[in-house]
């Protein structure tokens, strides 16, 4: 990679790092039930894209190898939901966007682990949050395996 490529990569990493730091800060400010809703939504999205697109987001590095524009495609899903004024659903895809970025960039890896540590605080609230969402909206979330961490992003590396 040449000089310009290194500059672009450095700039991109800095932007992604700032975005992930801001996202983690927002998660830190949430209580368990709020985090439970984020995890419920992210888990539902994980199941949905596995079924419709064949993406295994629990293996973000492998998934991006199979789908090189994965982060861009997830970003488009976020934009589509934001355009429909559905930020409560877009947040679930932000989890996966940041997971894919962190799994594939060593400079972001620890921040990805920090994100999943915060999300883990909501695990015990996922089922209640999903049930509440269904009561209000009529939409049922698939929360199976909500407590699974993506490969490489466990809060404490093993």
Image (cartoon, rainbow, N blue to C red):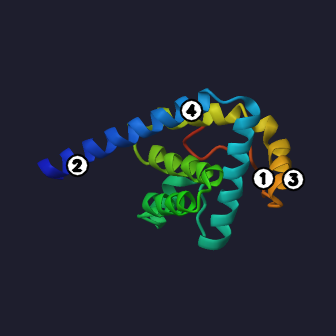
**Residues under numbered marks 1 and 4 in contact, where contact means CB atoms less than 8 Å apart:** no
The residue carrying pointer 1 sits among few (fewer than 14), some (14 to 19) or many (20 or more) residues within 10 Å by Cα, namely some
| Rendered residue at 22%/48% (across/down) | 8
Q: Can residue 158 be seen in this view?
A: no
Q: Is residue 44 above or below residue 155?
A: below
Decide if residue 90 is on the left or right side of residue 71.
Answer: right
Q: How many marks?
A: 4
Q: Which of marks 4 and 3 is nearer the N terminus?
A: 4
Q: Marks 3 and 2, how far apart in space?
A: 46 Å
Q: Marks 4 and 3, how far apart in space?
A: 26 Å
Secondary structure under the numbered disc 4 in the rendered image: helix
What residue does disc 4 label?
26
Q: Residue furthest left?
A: 3
Secondary structure under the numbered disc 2 in the rendered image: helix
| Rendered residue at 65%/43% (across/down) | 149
Q: Earlier in the sequence, mark 2 or mark 4?
A: 2
The residue carrying pointer 4 sits among few (fewer than 14), some (14 to 19) or many (20 or more) residues within 10 Å by Cα, namely few
Task: Tell me the mark number nearer the camera, choosing from 3 and 2.
Answer: 3
What residue does disc 1 label?
143
| Residue 154 on image: x %, y % | 60, 37
Q: Marks 3 and 1, how far apart in space?
A: 15 Å
What residue does disc 2 label?
8
């Amino acid at each position: 990679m040449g000089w310009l490529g290194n500059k672009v990569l450095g700039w991109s990493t800095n932007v992604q790092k700032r975005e992930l730091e801001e996202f983690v800060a927002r998660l830190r400010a949430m209580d368990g039930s709020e985090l439970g809703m984020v995890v419920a939504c992210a888990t539902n999205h994980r199941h949905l894209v596995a079924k419709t697109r064949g993406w295994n987001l629990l293996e973000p590095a492998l998934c991006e190898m199979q789908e090189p524009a994965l982060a861009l495609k997830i970003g488009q899903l976020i934009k589509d939901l934001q355009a429909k004024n559905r930020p409560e659903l877009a947040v679930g895809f932000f989890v996966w966007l940041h997971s894919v970025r962190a799994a594939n960039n060593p400079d972001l890896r620890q921040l990805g682990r920090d994100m999943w540590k915060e999300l883990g605080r909501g695990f015990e609230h996922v089922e209640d949050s999903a049930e509440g969402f269904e009561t209000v909206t009529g939409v049922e979330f698939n929360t199976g395996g909500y407590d699974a961490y993506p490969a490489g992003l466990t809060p404490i590396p093993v």
